[in-house]
Amino acid sequence: MPNIELLEKSMPVAPIRIAALGCRELAEEVDRKLVKFRKELVERKQLSAIPQGYSEESFIVECECPRFGTGEGKGYIKESVRGTDLYIMVDVTNYSESYTVCGHENHMSPDNHFQDLKRIISAATGKAHRINVIMPFLYEGRQHRRTKRESLDCALALKELSDMGVSNIITFDAHDPRVQNSIPLNGFDNFSLLISFKALIKSVPDLRVDNDHLMIISPDEGAMSRAVYFSNILGVDMGMFYKRRDYSTIVNGKNPIVAHEFLGDSVEGKDVVVIDDMISSGGSMLDVAKQLKERNAKRVFVCTTYGLFTDGLDKFDEYYEKGWLDRVITTNLNYRIPELLERPYYVEANMSKYLASIIDIINHDVSVEKVRSSNEKIMSLMEKVNSR
């Protein structure tokens, strides 16, 4: 069990309860890991008296958000959460769920999921000891700043959760973590992931991590800091693409990309890892992969936290068949269509154990820095890679 020495010396603030909105499968995986962690810790501590609610067969609390015929909804928690450390897990990207409005089926949007989150917080009626929101894909995280006359959706959402009494917000690879400045007195934990890179190494046994055989690529300016971090700690070179846009035209609310321009050393004969926080439609990522292959890169691996695939998988299938793309690695933190899991190029990075560890650490009210820091984990991973 991770961080067991840290947890041995501390006590939980309250019994854990987990509520799942749009991510039941992930929540159940996390629950199983947490149950296992707690049983191991109880055996190791050899406690004569176990704190109430500390070791359970399940920590999941049943809840739902039923709808009236008009589409209006309400939140309903089916058991008491009084005095508990409540963790509400929500996947705002899960469009597979639906509801009916006057006989018409509507798929759940991020706005709908956020409203349901607020309904469940309201249903707790202030009786929980502490409310924590685990929102892996941060709601409106891409609308994180204002240019011209625009809304500040992410900041407003965080402020609203703060005003409703949420103590901690846990997210992963926020598009811009500086949005936490909108709630400076609240807990905001943004975890950057190395799990996708770890999954890549496991799925490609012959991957050689050194400066002669590997290169880290940033697909745009926004992913630069992430790529710089990985290239430094792995001791390999880094390159980046920047987007040349047509600012005289607006298509689907944004300026279209004219071309991706590359800055960096030669990628010829090297494996390249393209690192970013998400794949949305995937157009930019696919163009980057194609250009890297045209520059004679050996293999192209794409590692992201979220795989949204908003335009489907046809283009990814085509690029894989043409040899322009070798692997796509994303986590299980957001909804993915079942067809994706069957693709030969897709690799899943399972985050359930990591999430359970985070919940356990926060419930014990100790520092999350050991969980957040990736340096030691990456160095340990590199030792294993170099020794095989």
Image (spheres, rainbow, N blue to C red):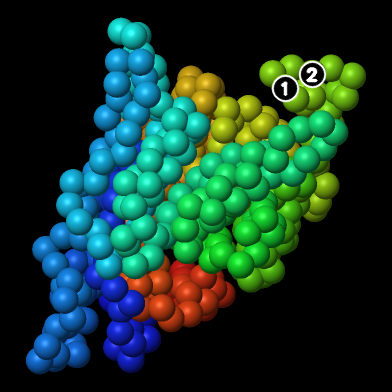
Relative to the observer, which residue lies in front, 386 or 379? Answer: 379
Identify the image quadrant of residue 338.
Answer: top left
Identify the image quadrant of residue 154.
Answer: top right
State the mark number for residue 250.
2
Classify residue 361 as left or right of residue 145.
Answer: left
Q: Amino acid at mark 1?
A: Gly
Q: Please say if 83 is above or below 89.
A: below
> Looking at the figure, which quarter contains the C terminus?
bottom left
* Residue located at (86% from left, 23% from top): 246
Classify residue 327 as left or right of residue 360.
Answer: right
Give how far across and how far down residue 51 sits, in percent: 18, 81
Give how far across and how far down residue 145 sits, in percent: 74, 44
* Residue located at (57% from left, 44% from top): 157
Q: Please say if 68 is above or below 361.
A: above
Residue 264 visible within the image? yes
Give how far across and how far down residue 255 sits, in percent: 79, 24
Circle 1 SS class: loop
The answer to the question of whether label 1 and label 2 lie on touching residues, with beta carbons closer than 8 A, is yes
Classify residue 203 as left or right of residue 147.
Answer: left
The total of numbered circles placed on residues is 2
Q: Amino acid at mark 2?
A: Ile
Give how far across and how far down residue 165 sits, in percent: 47, 58
Residue lying at the far top of the rendered structure: 103
Instruction: Count residues near mark 2 (Cα–Cα under 10 Å), then give few for <14, some for 14-19, many for 20+.
Output: few
Q: Please say if 242 is above or below 83.
A: above
Instruction: Count residues near mark 1 (Cα–Cα under 10 Å), then give few for <14, some for 14-19, many for 20+.
Output: few
State the mark number for residue 253.
1
